Each structure stands twice: as C-alpha cells, then as structure tokens.
Amino acid sequence: MAKILKEFDFDNPPKPLETYLDGRIWQLQKGVDFEVKPENFKSTLYKIAAKQNKKLRTAIVGDIITVQSYTEFDETKTEEFTG
C-alpha cells in the first residue's frame, strides 16, 4: 500500500537486502537498518541468500544481527594445506 511521507533522506535511501549478501560481515540494528524482529529479518535474509545459491553465518544479540554470506566453496574461508 502506498503511503505519503513527511520527509525522506534521499542521500541515504534504504539499501536493498541483497546489499547485505555481498560476502562482507554486516552488523545491522533494529530501528536503524530494519524494523521487524531480528529473527524475522534473519529468515528473510536466508530466503534471499538461498535464491542466490548462498549460505549465511548469523548471530543475533539483542536487537543487533550480524550476517555474512558465502558460497559452498569460498576461497576466502579455506586454509592452505602446508603438509
């Protein structure tokens, strides 16, 4: 449903959720980065990640969720075997 806003920060628009699935570690706070319960936000991120064939690492502490996406084979997460 459309809504009329009294103001909007055009210099800092909301980020598409896919932004948080770029492999970097993101720490997101309820009321700043999302509005729903952190557990619900986490579920949404998992669904989006699955559509992109990605997996997630997540941690929720209070109203803060930390998330990092990765692929099944992620070279940045492997250790070199030195024998």
Image: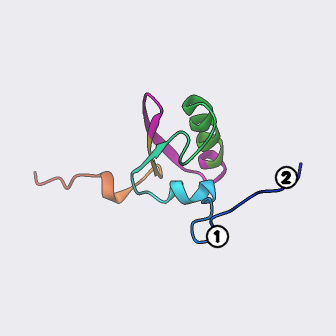
Judging depth in this view, the residue of 24 and 33 nearest the camera is: 33
Which label sits on residue 10? 1
Identified at 62% across, 45% down, the residue is 50
| Region in magenta | 49-65
Question: How many numbered marks are there?
Answer: 2
The percent position of residue 64, horizontal first and vertical second, equals: 45, 36
The percent position of residue 63, horizontal first and vertical second, equals: 48, 32
N-terminal of the two: label 1 or label 2?
2
Badge 2 density bin: few <14, some 14–19, many ≥20, Cα 10 Å = few
- Secondary element at tag 1: loop
In the image, residue 39 above or below residue 27: above
Q: Is residue 53 magenta?
A: yes
Which residue carries the number 2 mark? Answer: 3
Q: Quadrant of residue 62?
A: top left
Judging depth in this view, the residue of 8 and 28 nearest the camera is: 8
- The residue under label 2 is which amino acid type? Lys
Q: Is residue 77 magenta?
A: no
